[in-house]
Amino acid sequence: MIADAALRLFRARGFDAVTVDEVAQAAQVSKKTVFNYYPTKEDLLFPKVDRREAMLVDALAAVGPELSLVESFRQLCLEHSRLIQRLRRDTEQGEQSVFEMIQQHPALRRKLHENDARLTRRVAEGLAALSGRPVEDPVVVTVAETLLAAQRALYRGLRRRVAAGGTDEAIAADYRRDVDRVFGLLAHGLNTADAFAGSALSGNALAGTASAGTVSAGTVAVGFVQAGDAFAPRPGIRAGGEEVAAVPPADGRLRTDQTR
Protein backbone atom coordinates (compact mmCIF):
# COMPACT_ATOMS: atom_id res chain seq x y z
CA MET A 1 0.00 0.00 0.00
CA ILE A 2 1.09 3.55 -0.71
CA ALA A 3 0.46 4.73 2.85
CA ASP A 4 2.44 1.81 4.31
CA ALA A 5 5.42 2.60 2.09
CA ALA A 6 5.20 6.27 3.09
CA LEU A 7 5.06 5.45 6.78
CA ARG A 8 8.17 3.25 6.58
CA LEU A 9 10.07 6.10 4.94
CA PHE A 10 8.78 8.72 7.36
CA ARG A 11 9.80 6.59 10.34
CA ALA A 12 13.24 5.93 8.91
CA ARG A 13 14.12 9.45 7.78
CA GLY A 14 11.52 11.88 9.14
CA PHE A 15 8.50 13.43 7.47
CA ASP A 16 10.26 16.47 6.00
CA ALA A 17 13.17 14.49 4.54
CA VAL A 18 10.98 12.27 2.37
CA THR A 19 9.59 13.43 -0.98
CA VAL A 20 6.43 12.26 -2.70
CA ASP A 21 8.61 11.00 -5.56
CA GLU A 22 10.40 8.72 -3.11
CA VAL A 23 7.09 7.47 -1.73
CA ALA A 24 5.93 6.67 -5.26
CA GLN A 25 9.15 4.81 -5.99
CA ALA A 26 8.92 2.79 -2.75
CA ALA A 27 5.28 1.92 -3.47
CA GLN A 28 6.08 1.12 -7.12
CA VAL A 29 3.50 3.52 -8.48
CA SER A 30 3.64 6.85 -10.28
CA LYS A 31 3.68 10.17 -8.48
CA LYS A 32 0.35 10.94 -10.16
CA THR A 33 -1.13 7.79 -8.62
CA VAL A 34 0.02 8.88 -5.16
CA PHE A 35 -1.75 12.21 -5.55
CA ASN A 36 -4.86 10.52 -6.95
CA TYR A 37 -5.28 8.77 -3.60
CA TYR A 38 -3.67 11.35 -1.32
CA PRO A 39 -4.14 15.01 -2.38
CA THR A 40 -1.34 16.22 -0.10
CA LYS A 41 1.77 14.70 1.42
CA GLU A 42 0.21 15.11 4.88
CA ASP A 43 -2.75 12.94 3.83
CA LEU A 44 -0.37 9.96 3.57
CA LEU A 45 -0.40 9.75 7.38
CA PHE A 46 -4.20 9.72 7.52
CA PRO A 47 -5.11 6.87 5.14
CA LYS A 48 -8.11 5.71 7.15
CA VAL A 49 -9.99 8.98 7.58
CA ASP A 50 -12.48 8.06 4.84
CA ARG A 51 -13.09 4.67 6.45
CA ARG A 52 -13.54 6.30 9.85
CA GLU A 53 -16.07 8.73 8.38
CA ALA A 54 -17.98 5.82 6.84
CA MET A 55 -18.05 4.02 10.20
CA LEU A 56 -19.41 7.14 11.90
CA VAL A 57 -22.11 7.45 9.26
CA ASP A 58 -23.01 3.78 9.77
CA ALA A 59 -23.22 4.31 13.55
CA LEU A 60 -25.66 7.17 13.02
CA ALA A 61 -27.68 5.20 10.49
CA ALA A 62 -28.08 2.37 13.00
CA VAL A 63 -29.87 4.60 15.53
CA GLY A 64 -33.53 3.69 15.83
CA PRO A 65 -36.17 2.05 18.03
CA GLU A 66 -33.85 -0.80 19.00
CA LEU A 67 -30.57 1.11 19.33
CA SER A 68 -29.88 4.40 21.10
CA LEU A 69 -27.40 6.98 19.87
CA VAL A 70 -24.90 6.42 22.67
CA GLU A 71 -25.21 2.63 22.49
CA SER A 72 -24.45 2.74 18.78
CA PHE A 73 -21.29 4.75 19.40
CA ARG A 74 -20.37 2.55 22.37
CA GLN A 75 -20.42 -0.46 20.08
CA LEU A 76 -18.32 1.42 17.54
CA CYS A 77 -15.67 2.20 20.16
CA LEU A 78 -15.62 -1.40 21.37
CA GLU A 79 -14.34 -2.36 17.94
CA HIS A 80 -11.06 -0.59 18.74
CA SER A 81 -10.04 -3.62 20.80
CA ARG A 82 -9.19 -5.38 17.53
CA LEU A 83 -6.29 -2.91 17.17
CA ILE A 84 -4.42 -4.24 20.21
CA GLN A 85 -2.09 -6.54 18.28
CA ARG A 86 -1.20 -3.84 15.77
CA LEU A 87 -0.49 -1.35 18.56
CA ARG A 88 1.61 -3.98 20.31
CA ARG A 89 3.70 -4.60 17.20
CA ASP A 90 4.50 -0.91 16.94
CA THR A 91 5.46 -0.80 20.63
CA GLU A 92 7.61 -3.93 20.54
CA GLN A 93 9.46 -2.80 17.42
CA GLY A 94 10.28 0.48 19.12
CA GLU A 95 8.84 2.41 16.20
CA GLN A 96 7.60 5.94 16.53
CA SER A 97 3.82 5.90 16.52
CA VAL A 98 1.89 7.86 13.94
CA PHE A 99 0.36 9.85 16.79
CA GLU A 100 3.80 10.86 18.08
CA MET A 101 4.92 11.82 14.58
CA ILE A 102 1.84 13.96 14.09
CA GLN A 103 2.25 15.74 17.43
CA GLN A 104 5.83 16.70 16.57
CA HIS A 105 5.04 18.35 13.23
CA PRO A 106 2.96 21.56 12.85
CA ALA A 107 1.66 20.72 9.36
CA LEU A 108 0.54 17.28 10.49
CA ARG A 109 -1.17 18.73 13.55
CA ARG A 110 -3.07 21.10 11.28
CA LYS A 111 -4.13 18.20 9.08
CA LEU A 112 -5.27 16.31 12.18
CA HIS A 113 -7.41 19.26 13.24
CA GLU A 114 -8.82 19.57 9.72
CA ASN A 115 -9.79 15.91 9.75
CA ASP A 116 -11.34 16.22 13.21
CA ALA A 117 -13.37 19.22 12.03
CA ARG A 118 -14.49 17.29 8.95
CA LEU A 119 -15.62 14.30 11.02
CA THR A 120 -17.35 16.51 13.59
CA ARG A 121 -19.24 18.26 10.80
CA ARG A 122 -20.23 14.90 9.31
CA VAL A 123 -21.59 13.64 12.64
CA ALA A 124 -23.36 16.94 13.25
CA GLU A 125 -25.00 16.66 9.83
CA GLY A 126 -26.21 13.18 10.69
CA LEU A 127 -27.58 14.32 14.05
CA ALA A 128 -29.27 17.28 12.42
CA ALA A 129 -30.93 15.00 9.89
CA LEU A 130 -32.16 12.69 12.65
CA SER A 131 -33.44 15.46 14.88
CA GLY A 132 -34.65 18.06 12.42
CA ARG A 133 -32.49 20.70 14.08
CA PRO A 134 -30.03 22.97 12.23
CA VAL A 135 -26.54 21.56 11.93
CA GLU A 136 -25.23 24.68 13.71
CA ASP A 137 -27.54 24.14 16.71
CA PRO A 138 -25.35 24.25 19.85
CA VAL A 139 -26.81 20.99 21.14
CA VAL A 140 -26.15 19.22 17.84
CA VAL A 141 -22.56 20.49 17.75
CA THR A 142 -21.99 19.66 21.43
CA VAL A 143 -23.21 16.09 21.02
CA ALA A 144 -21.15 15.58 17.85
CA GLU A 145 -17.97 16.91 19.47
CA THR A 146 -18.57 14.91 22.64
CA LEU A 147 -19.03 11.61 20.83
CA LEU A 148 -15.86 12.11 18.81
CA ALA A 149 -13.91 13.28 21.86
CA ALA A 150 -14.95 10.10 23.67
CA GLN A 151 -13.75 8.01 20.74
CA ARG A 152 -10.38 9.79 20.66
CA ALA A 153 -9.87 9.58 24.43
CA LEU A 154 -10.66 5.87 24.49
CA TYR A 155 -8.28 5.13 21.61
CA ARG A 156 -5.45 7.02 23.28
CA GLY A 157 -6.18 5.20 26.52
CA LEU A 158 -5.95 1.91 24.66
CA ARG A 159 -2.57 2.90 23.25
CA ARG A 160 -1.30 3.69 26.75
CA ARG A 161 -2.55 0.35 28.07
CA VAL A 162 -0.77 -1.54 25.29
CA ALA A 163 2.45 0.39 25.93
CA ALA A 164 2.22 -0.41 29.67
CA GLY A 165 2.18 -4.15 28.93
CA GLY A 166 -0.11 -7.03 29.84
CA THR A 167 -1.87 -9.75 27.92
CA ASP A 168 -4.19 -8.99 25.04
CA GLU A 169 -7.08 -10.39 27.07
CA ALA A 170 -6.35 -8.20 30.10
CA ILE A 171 -5.93 -5.08 27.97
CA ALA A 172 -9.16 -5.80 26.10
CA ALA A 173 -11.06 -6.33 29.37
CA ASP A 174 -9.74 -3.07 30.84
CA TYR A 175 -10.55 -1.27 27.61
CA ARG A 176 -14.12 -2.57 27.63
CA ARG A 177 -14.50 -1.25 31.18
CA ASP A 178 -13.21 2.13 30.03
CA VAL A 179 -15.74 2.17 27.19
CA ASP A 180 -18.58 1.27 29.55
CA ARG A 181 -17.55 3.95 32.07
CA VAL A 182 -17.31 6.68 29.42
CA PHE A 183 -20.57 5.86 27.70
CA GLY A 184 -22.30 5.21 30.99
CA LEU A 185 -21.46 8.78 31.90
CA LEU A 186 -22.71 10.08 28.57
CA ALA A 187 -25.86 8.04 28.94
CA HIS A 188 -26.86 9.64 32.22
CA GLY A 189 -25.36 13.12 32.02
CA LEU A 190 -22.59 14.75 34.02
CA ASN A 191 -24.62 15.25 37.18
CA THR A 192 -24.70 11.60 38.17
CA ALA A 193 -24.20 10.45 41.74
CA ASP A 194 -21.26 8.14 41.03
CA ALA A 195 -19.52 9.61 37.98
CA PHE A 196 -16.84 11.19 40.19
CA ALA A 197 -17.61 9.51 43.51
CA GLY A 198 -15.22 10.40 46.28
CA SER A 199 -13.90 13.51 44.55
CA ALA A 200 -14.64 17.23 44.64
CA LEU A 201 -16.92 16.66 41.64
CA SER A 202 -19.19 14.14 43.35
CA GLY A 203 -22.86 14.71 44.00
CA ASN A 204 -24.23 18.01 42.78
CA ALA A 205 -20.87 19.73 42.38
CA LEU A 206 -21.06 19.36 38.60
CA ALA A 207 -24.40 21.13 38.44
CA GLY A 208 -23.11 24.32 40.02
CA THR A 209 -25.38 26.99 41.42
CA ALA A 210 -28.90 27.11 40.08
CA SER A 211 -29.81 30.21 38.13
CA ALA A 212 -32.58 31.32 35.83
CA GLY A 213 -32.39 29.67 32.45
CA THR A 214 -30.23 26.78 33.62
CA VAL A 215 -30.85 23.30 34.91
CA SER A 216 -31.03 23.66 38.66
CA ALA A 217 -28.74 21.83 41.04
CA GLY A 218 -30.24 18.67 42.44
CA THR A 219 -32.23 17.81 39.31
CA VAL A 220 -31.50 14.98 36.97
CA ALA A 221 -28.94 16.11 34.38
CA VAL A 222 -29.82 16.07 30.72
CA GLY A 223 -28.33 13.05 28.99
CA PHE A 224 -28.37 12.53 25.27
CA VAL A 225 -28.47 8.82 24.95
CA GLN A 226 -31.79 7.35 24.22
CA ALA A 227 -33.01 7.41 20.66
CA GLY A 228 -36.21 9.37 20.81
CA ASP A 229 -35.27 11.85 23.53
CA ALA A 230 -31.68 12.58 22.61
CA PHE A 231 -32.28 16.29 22.27
CA ALA A 232 -35.17 16.67 24.68
CA PRO A 233 -34.80 17.23 28.45
CA ARG A 234 -35.92 14.37 30.63
CA PRO A 235 -39.16 14.75 32.60
CA GLY A 236 -38.72 16.64 35.86
CA ILE A 237 -36.05 19.03 34.65
CA ARG A 238 -36.78 22.71 35.08
CA ALA A 239 -35.35 25.18 32.61
CA GLY A 240 -35.80 28.85 33.41
CA GLY A 241 -38.27 28.01 36.15
CA GLU A 242 -40.66 26.13 33.87
CA GLU A 243 -41.08 22.39 33.85
CA VAL A 244 -40.06 20.88 30.55
CA ALA A 245 -41.35 17.48 29.57
CA ALA A 246 -39.95 15.19 26.91
CA VAL A 247 -42.37 14.19 24.19
CA PRO A 248 -42.44 10.41 23.79
CA PRO A 249 -41.29 9.46 20.29
CA ALA A 250 -43.79 7.86 17.98
CA ASP A 251 -41.13 6.17 15.89
CA GLY A 252 -38.16 5.85 18.25
CA ARG A 253 -36.10 8.37 16.28
CA LEU A 254 -34.48 11.49 17.64
CA ARG A 255 -37.03 14.22 18.30
CA THR A 256 -36.89 17.97 18.67
CA ASP A 257 -40.13 18.58 20.59
CA GLN A 258 -39.26 20.03 23.98
CA THR A 259 -42.41 21.30 25.57
CA ARG A 260 -46.09 20.52 25.76
Image (spheres, rainbow, N blue to C red):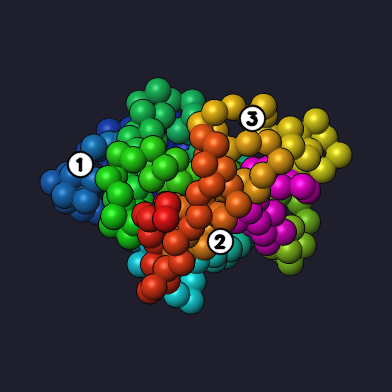
Q: Nearer the viewer, residue 97 or 228?
A: 228
The image position of residue 200, as x and y in percent, is 80, 30
In the displayed orientation, state which residue is furthest to the top.
106
| Main secondary structure along the magenta-highlighted residues | helix
In the displayed orientation, state which residue is furthest to the right.
198
> In this rendering, which labeled residue sits more in front, label 2 or label 3?
3
The image position of residue 229, as x and y in percent, is 47, 59
Q: Is residue 209 magenta?
A: no
Q: Residue at x 42, y 46 (%)?
A: 144
Marks 2,3: beta carbons within 8 A: no
Specify the amino acid type for callout 2. Arg
The image position of residue 241, as x and y in percent, is 55, 37
Q: Residue at x 38, y 33 (%)?
A: 113
Q: Nearer the viewer, residue 170 or 118?
A: 118
The answer to whether 152 is drawn above or below residue 41 in the figure is: below
Residue at numbered disc 1? 39
Residue at numbered disc 3? 210
Q: Residues within 10 Å of mark 1 (few under 14, many from 20)?
A: few
Q: Is residue 181 magenta?
A: yes
Ranked by sequence position, the earlier of labels 2 and 1 is 1
Q: Is residue 60 visible?
A: yes
Q: Quadrant of the N terminus?
A: bottom left
Mark identifier at residue 74: 2
Q: Which residues are magenta?
A: 175-195
Q: Residues within 10 Å of mark 3 (few under 14, many from 20)?
A: few
